[in-house]
Image (cartoon, rainbow, N blue to C red):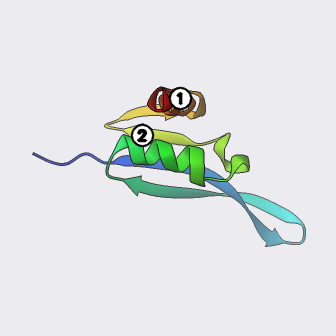
Amino acid sequence: MTKQFVLVQWFSNDSIGGGKIRPREELRRFDDRRAAVRFVMEDLEKTKRRNVRMIVEGTEFRFVDIVRMYAGRKA
């Protein structure tokens, strides 16, 4: 049986000179959903959270979903 992983994806802005900025995709892989949710809510900069997505076994979760998971974990 293959172990599933969780992928967190967000975009950062990179300066390419001359006052121009372009988005850069960033990815981070986690072994479980709980660690990924904690990373997004506690470690990822607030400015980068708005376009974050988490992919678990082919299912995509957006920031609002991650907030709900985090709140459920805290309850």
Can you say whether 60 is above or below 48 in the image?
above
Q: Residue at x 35, y 35 (%)?
A: 58
Q: Dot 1 surroundings within 10 Å: few (below 14), some, or many (20 or more)?
A: few
Q: How many marks?
A: 2
Q: Residue furthest bottom?
A: 17
Q: Earlier in the sequence, mark 2 or mark 1?
A: 2
Q: Dot 2 surroundings within 10 Å: few (below 14), some, or many (20 or more)?
A: some
Asked if residue 23 lies left or right of residue 2, the reply is: right
Quadrant (top left/top right/bottom left/bottom right) for the N terminus: top left
Can you say whether 5 is above or below 21 in the image?
above
- Foreground mark, 2 or 1, reads 1
Rendering coords of residue 64 (x, y %): 59, 28
Q: Which residue is mark 1?
A: 71
Rendering coords of residue 31 (x, y %): 31, 51
Q: Residue furthest right?
A: 19
The image quarter containing residue 17 is: bottom right
Residue type highlighted by circle 1: Ala
Q: Residue at x 64, y 41 (%)?
A: 51
Q: CA distance from mark 2 to mark 1?
A: 19 Å
- For label 1, the SS is helix
Q: Which residue is mark 2?
A: 55
Rendering coords of residue 19 (x, y %): 90, 67
Q: Residue at x 51, y 34 (%)?
A: 70
Q: Residue at x 38, y 41 (%)?
A: 33
- For label 2, the SS is strand
Residue type highlighted by circle 2: Ile
The image quarter containing residue 63 is: top right
